[in-house]
Image: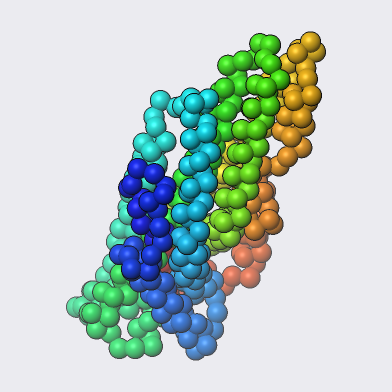
């Protein structure tokens, strides 16, 4: 999704964006596939109208479409940003020490493996749920082609516009898989970037804690404040590049949580449907919470120097300490969603309150519950939730 070459090289100077890259082909394929599916969804709206289930499919593929564009734009800027980041890390290398026993690269690999494995499990359950619906419909219609029924019921926006064939179905399913992992990658990317920024603040805080209660010269406090200022500037620069991605992540995750809760009022007719719903909803909430807390940890870590600076004795209190303390207590360092909101711990409670509010509105305007439970024919006509 982030088509930058040279990620396995020893330093950031080897990073580059090029239009002739296999990674770029993946991004373009995901982008074109999302465009096609978005167009099919819009065409379906013009014929059958809009409801929450059909809107879900449009938002899903629209998210993949926008994410592909945003990461393509970011890839052009990433080599320069990485060089700046590496320069700061090299300056800190001789003064700061690693806090965690596990290296940052090791934590990256662990988090990536967990998120993508869970995403794969969720997608597998979604396929099984789709086949569960398809088998029910096949029995009702006395049909024998379960695979055709599966694709026609999972992707009605496509196969209501064109005739079904296996090669088309496989192509649509590949696009669906690319969009699924693109959606998950948005959250994963924000988690990893947040971990890296917070780790830099943790190293600075560890250095400050090591001198707590000690008398340090002015040059030492000036150096520490300068390091803090470099990290604040780096955070703002990173935020200027990814704030749109942050906004996209929180907006779509909030939407899908509300929709999933809305669908929970519908009758789950089989065990696989119940398992899928519970796992999918739990994974979505966990992922959203992880993004919020990891991103909020940047703001948390940026405020931790304050108690240490407050503990400096009056005999050792100096202009440099005062300037450092003023910056820590007045400067707001955090990732933002296009400057509309700052990602702090308080945002988690705000999101929870927003979900409750929107859920009440959605329940009042939704009419799916009355149509989905009427008879078995409707099961075969309802658009499946594609996640």
Frontmost residue, 245 versus 146: 245
Frontmost residue, 357 versus 247: 247
**Residue in view at x 44 percent, y 77 percent:** 35
Q: Where is residue 222 shown, x and y percent of the image? A: 68, 27
Q: Can residue 168 be seen from the camera position used here?
A: yes
Q: Where is residue 194 shown, x and y percent of the image? A: 52, 43
Q: Is residue 95 above or below residue 127?
A: above
Find residue 162 and report its image quarter: bottom left
Tell me if 99 is positioned left or right of 28 in this view: right
Q: Is residue 335 above or below residue 254?
A: above
Q: Is residue 63 above or below residue 12?
A: below
**Residue in view at x 57 percent, y 72 percent:** 367
Tell me the quadrant of the picture where the C terminus can be found. Answer: bottom left
Frontmost residue, 135 versus 57: 57
Tell me if 184 is positioned left or right of 302 in this view: left
Q: Where is residue 5 shown, x and y percent of the image? A: 36, 57
Find residue 153 and report its image quarter: bottom left
Tell me if 298 is positioned left or right of 53 in this view: right
Check the image and tell me how it is coloured.
rainbow
Q: Where is residue 120 shown, x and y percent of the image? A: 32, 54
């Amino acid at each position: 999704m982030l088509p930058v070459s040279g990620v396995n090289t020893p330093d950031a100077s080897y990073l580059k964006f090029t239009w002739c890259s296999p990674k770029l082909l993946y991004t373009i394929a995901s982008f074109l596939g999302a465009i096609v599916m978005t167009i099919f969804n819009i065409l379906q709206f013009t014929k059958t109208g809009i409801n929450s289930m059909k809107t879900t499919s449009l938002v899903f593929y629209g998210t993949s479409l926008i994410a592909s564009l945003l990461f393509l734009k970011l890839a052009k800027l990433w080599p320069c940003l990485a060089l700046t980041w590496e320069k700061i890390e090299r300056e800190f290398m001789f003064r700061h020490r690693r806090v965690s026993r596990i290296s940052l690269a090791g934590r990256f690999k662990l988090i990536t493996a967990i998120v993508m494995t869970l995403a794969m499990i969720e997608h597998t359950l979604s396929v099984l749920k789709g086949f569960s619906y398809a088998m029910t419909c096949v029995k009702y219609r006395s049909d024998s082609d379960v695979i055709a029924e599966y694709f026609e019921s999972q992707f009605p926006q496509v196969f209501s516009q064109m005739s079904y064939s296996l090669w088309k179905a496989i192509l649509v399913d590949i696009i669906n898989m690319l969009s699924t992992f693109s959606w998950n990658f948005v959250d994963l990317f924000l988690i990893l970037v947040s971990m890296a920024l917070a780790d830099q603040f943790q190293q600075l805080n560890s250095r400050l804690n090591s001198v707590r209660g000690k008398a340090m010269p002015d040059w030492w406090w000036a150096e520490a404040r300068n390091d803090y200022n470099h990290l604040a500037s780096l955070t703002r620069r990173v935020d200027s590049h990814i704030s749109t991605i942050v906004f996209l992540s929180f907006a779509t995750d909030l939407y899908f949580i509300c929709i999933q809760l809305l669908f929970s009022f519908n009758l789950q007719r089989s065990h696989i449907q119940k398992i899928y719903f519970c796992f999918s909803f739990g994974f979505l909430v966990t992922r959203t919470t992880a993004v919020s807390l990891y991103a909020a940890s940047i703001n948390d870590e940026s405020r931790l120097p304050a108690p240490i600076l407050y503990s400096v004795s009056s005999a050792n209190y100096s202009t440099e300490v005062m300037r450092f303390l003023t910056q820590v207590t007045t400067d707001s360092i955090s990732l933002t969603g296009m400057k509309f909101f700052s990602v702090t711990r308080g945002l988690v409670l705000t999101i929870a309150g927003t979900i409750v509010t929107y859920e009440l509105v959605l329940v009042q305007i939704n009419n799916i519950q009355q149509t989905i439970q009427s008879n078995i024919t409707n099961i075969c006509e309802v658009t499946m939730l594609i996640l």
